[in-house]
Image: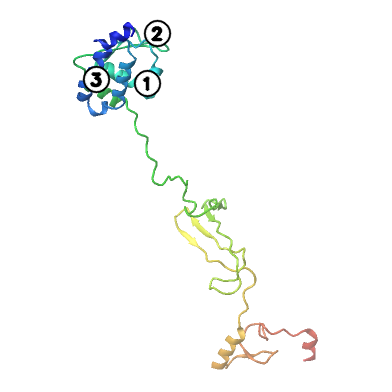
Amino acid sequence: MSNEEQDRASGSVPNAFGNALAWKWSREMPTPLRRGFLTLLYALRAMANASGELRFTGDRQPIRIQDIARAAGASEKDARRYLDAAIRSGAVVVKGERKRGKPTLYVIVPTPWPDWKAAEDYLKSTARKPGKRPAPWSTETGSSGDRDPNQNGSPRPELTDGTDNEVRVTATRMSSGHRDPNGSGHRDPNNPGVTQELSQDGAQVVSQPQPLGPPESQDHDSHEDDHAAADTSGWLLCARCGDPMLPRYGRTTHAHCQPFTEPERTAS
């Protein structure tokens, strides 16, 4: 056993510091100090020489803060905070000057009256503030108001006509199949209908989808025959089929009857 080990075992500064730490200080400390701060003090006690200095035995150089942080299982930033708190409590002192880029020589002191309240206040004042929680509407999915959160694919594009009213037209999905707004008939697949949102006055105008192409043929015969069955007085007779028809200016035949050609008109 070396002389230094004998000194540490028989009444040395690390021995007195460790006894006070284990049997008195750890029981008097506030609860917030019994975590990383207490672990650092135990690491300092184990690394100090017989005189309580934290320096290497061979070259007598001060132990770096990086080595102290590793021994305490803390980050370098937290190790500095714990050391500063220990200095305020009186359990650690600095020997010499503290200069940036140069290792600082720390010395442990088995003080009879450590000020743990000062150490606790310093750690509270230098604690990292918790980060702000994200807003409820800012989710991981990155969903915005442009599309339904359960809908796959990219948001629907918004088209503007460049006018002052800023009429926004939201493109809808193309529909296919043979149906009209009433549920039957043919509907062109490229006529999905549009939804217009007027941003000027906040009003929303929704136009119903309209089928393209010529209007569906109406059964004029059935309508006109119904009217004829009820009352045909004052009605005209179709020059082609001879059935009653509504009097209309410039018309002598039903819409579905073919008009007379020039030879037929001459023959008649």
Q: Residues within 10 Å of mark 2 (few under 14, many from 20)?
A: few
Q: Are marks 2 and 1 in contact (CB under 8 Å)?
A: no
Task: Work out how far the residue at label 3 is from the one at label 2, CA to CA, in angstroms.
Answer: 26 Å
SS category of the residue bearing label 1: helix
Is 88 left, or right, of 69 in this rendering? left
Q: Is residue 231 visible?
A: no
Q: Give the left or right position of residue 112, taking residue 187 as reference.
A: left
Q: Vertical placement of 159 versus 68: above or below? A: below
Residue ID for mark 1: 71
Q: Earlier along the polypeptide chain: callout 3 or callout 2?
A: 3
Q: How is the image coloured?
A: rainbow
- Amino acid beneath label 3: Leu
Say above or below: 53 vs 184. Answer: above
Q: Nearer the viewer, residue 163 or 18?
A: 18
Q: What's the mark number on residue 61?
A: 2
Q: Nearer the viewer, residue 5 or 264?
A: 5
Question: Tag 1: Cα neighbours inside 10 Å, few (<14), some, or many (≥20)?
Answer: some
Q: What amino acid is at disc 2? A: Gln
The mark closer to the camera, 3 or 2, is 3
